[in-house]
Amino acid sequence: MDLQLRVATLNDAPTLAAIYAPYVRETTISFEWVPPTAEEFRARMASVLEEYPYLVCERDGEILGYAYAHRAFERYSYRFCAELSVYVRTDARERGIGSLLYRALIALCREMRLQTLFGIVTDPNEPSFRLHERLGFHRVGHFPHAGQKFDRWIDVVWYSMVIGDDTVPPPDLIPFPRIPHDRVQQIFQEQQNSIQ
């Protein structure tokens, strides 16, 4: 497959909301109960894009999946942490799209000087477990009965990966919008080349 990565735009909101909706309606992968509207989704994207990367993966101009980083915790001392999320269109899963998006996202998080990344996965979700473990995340927590959906309790598994230099904290983060466009494109090209 000839897959292309790019930064999401707010015009992508209806398409991304449509990709996300089945995860909400039909699975316990998302703890939301009602799929967000395109307008709600656009507002969420705008908030993320102020500071963090939000990526889409396309083939022939058709979006097959998306991934983004966002603030993991509110307290200021946690600013070097981020949570990652990835969603792939239901008819495009198990084709390496999630891995491609995640690898590019991790590389961009390094550019931002983030230190620790988290993935929060509902249990069971073997494809997501495999994705995180294959990319170097470590299972750091298992929380029984963390949520309730479809009249049953759902466990949650936390994954973590340290991507920064753990000796001396950097002076501060570099917000994603300040990373040079050429560097972002270089990361995209490197990741795309890795699957050719």
Image: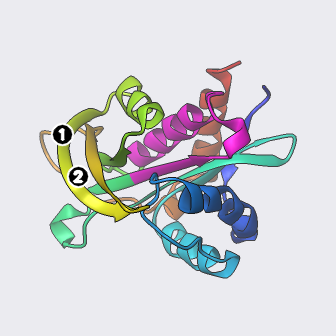
How many marks do you count on the picture?
2
**Labels 1 and 2: the sequence-earlier one:** 1
- Farthest residue, direction right: 60
> Quick one: SS at disc 2?
loop
Amino acid at the residue labelled 1: Val
> Quick one: SS at disc 1?
strand
Magenta region, residue range: 84-111
- Residue 118, given in percent of the width and then of the height, sits at 31, 48
Say if 123 sits above or below 78 in the image: above
Amino acid at the residue labelled 2: Pro
Q: Residue at x 61, y 50 (%)?
A: 66
- Residue 67 seen by the camera: yes
Q: Residue at x 59, y 74 (%)?
A: 36
Which residue is tagged 1? 140
- Residue 83, given in percent of the width and then of the height, sits at 36, 54
Say if 160 sits above or below 146 in the image: above
